[in-house]
Amino acid sequence: MVAQLGYEWEETGAVGQLRLHESDRPAFGGRDTVRVALQESAVDAGTESIDLKSGLGSWLLDRLKESGLAVHVRPREQPMAVQDISSRLFSAYRVENGRAHLGGCQLTDFPFLRLSFAAEEEGQPCVRHLFVAYDGTSVSDGQAQDLGLIDVEPIAKSPPRIEENALNALVASGRRIAAKNSSSRDPSASTVEPLLITLVWVKQAVGQLHFTVGDATAALPFSGWAKLIEAQPFVAKGSGASCYHLAATDDGRIDAYDEIATCDLSGRRVLRQELVTCSVTGKHVLEEFTESCPVSGKPALTEQFAPCATCRQRVSKSVLTRDTCTACQKMSKIKKDDPRLVWILGEHGGLDRWKRWQLSETQSVYIAQADRFMKRLLVVVDKETLAIRYLATSSRMSSTWTPIESALQAEYLS
Ligand SMILES: [Zn+2]
């Protein structure tokens, strides 16, 4: 209170010294300093009591009332400038080959009302504060502590302005809250007048952080009470990851550093999710350099494909053993009424002359084998269109297949 009035105050042990302004001295017998006993032990003829009801206490209150309806203060600890906030936020982020900067920040003062009432605690007179938020709601003790409403300092010059109506509305809210509080503590109590009305101006910050790597930029908005603002994680659009460590892909997308990886084939820096693992070499590469193997269903680098010596389908090398794919090696015997065979024979009636069918399938084709007299037949059929992909024969004793030219295939198929 002393500081709010612009007096100098010094404490030595249990005694405080208040330096009076020239104009105040007559009221204190011409003295320039008043000694105040801060503890019972320091009370003597030369000291004044700290009690608000004492001569000095009520004199100080009168001075406060003279100084205007409300005293303007602000939390002692709160960011006063945009740089205070930005430096705190920037330190939370790391931008690989780039930087974080402020894309705009506005600080706005919001008035919190503090009503101070004379009270008693364990028989000792004291002051009890009640806080009202700028929107007229009550402020909990925890909130008051967090926002710095307890430890305040006066605003020496040009405090923020508040319309008289707005101030009156705040004071009215405060009185209502005070009345409610005191009646719940002591139903017979009547609300007393506040000793002092103080406006605590609390800064709110609204702005945006920008992260830049080369030509790429990403924004992260922030808002909140300046004192409480903390760096929030950047949520990347591409990967969806939350992070404080950022980087950019080669094509200029900013994402989490951990979500960016290098294509082992092209050396391009892309999102990890855009890379696939080659099932033959184990390399992490862009999908565009791979094909899906019809036998394993897994991607492999295009250069890691070779034809199967039996079915002649292009398959990844990981499913080839001695030039034959896993599908050709694992043929199973099927009955004549197997729906897959029924379907194939329905399309190519001539095949019905063959017996003892075996079948295997990949993602794209059926591979079927059958016998007739001393010959064997191999037929590879597209699963979707039932078109013949490959047709070959062999003698029952041989393991090599002789392809049947398309011009001669009709003989077998119809
Ligand atoms: Zn094969």
Image (cartoon, rainbow, N blue to C red):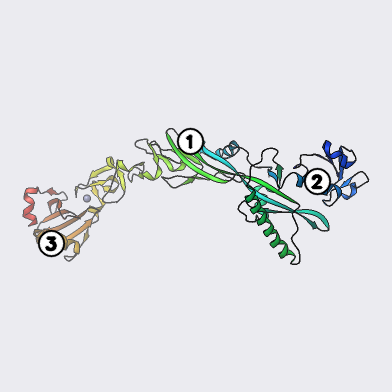
Which dot marks residue 70? none
Residue plotted at (70% across, 59% down)? 178
Residue plotted at (45% across, 34% down)? 213
Say whether mark 1 is within 8 Å of ligand 1: no
Q: Which mark lies nearer to you, 2 or 1?
A: 2
- For label 2, the residue is 60
| Earlier residue among tags 2 and 3 | 2
Establish if 385 lies above or below 335.
Answer: above
- For label 1, the residue is 96
Graded by Cα atoms within 10 Å as few (under 14), some (14 to 19) or many (20 or more), the crowding at tag 3 reads few
Q: Which mark lies nearer to you, 2 or 3?
A: 2
| Earlier residue among tags 2 and 1 | 2
Q: Which mark lies nearer to you, 3 or 1?
A: 1
Q: Nearer the viewer, residue 105 or 91?
A: 105
Q: Position of residue 10 (x, y in %)?
A: 82, 39
Graded by Cα atoms within 10 Å as few (under 14), some (14 to 19) or many (20 or more), the crowding at tag 1 reads some
Q: Is residue 272 left or right of residue 50?
A: left
Q: Is residue 164 left or right of residue 256?
A: right
- For label 3, the residue is 346
Residue type at numbered disc 2: Leu
Say whether mark 3 is within 8 Å of ligand 1: no
Q: Position of residue 306 (x, y in %)?
A: 24, 43
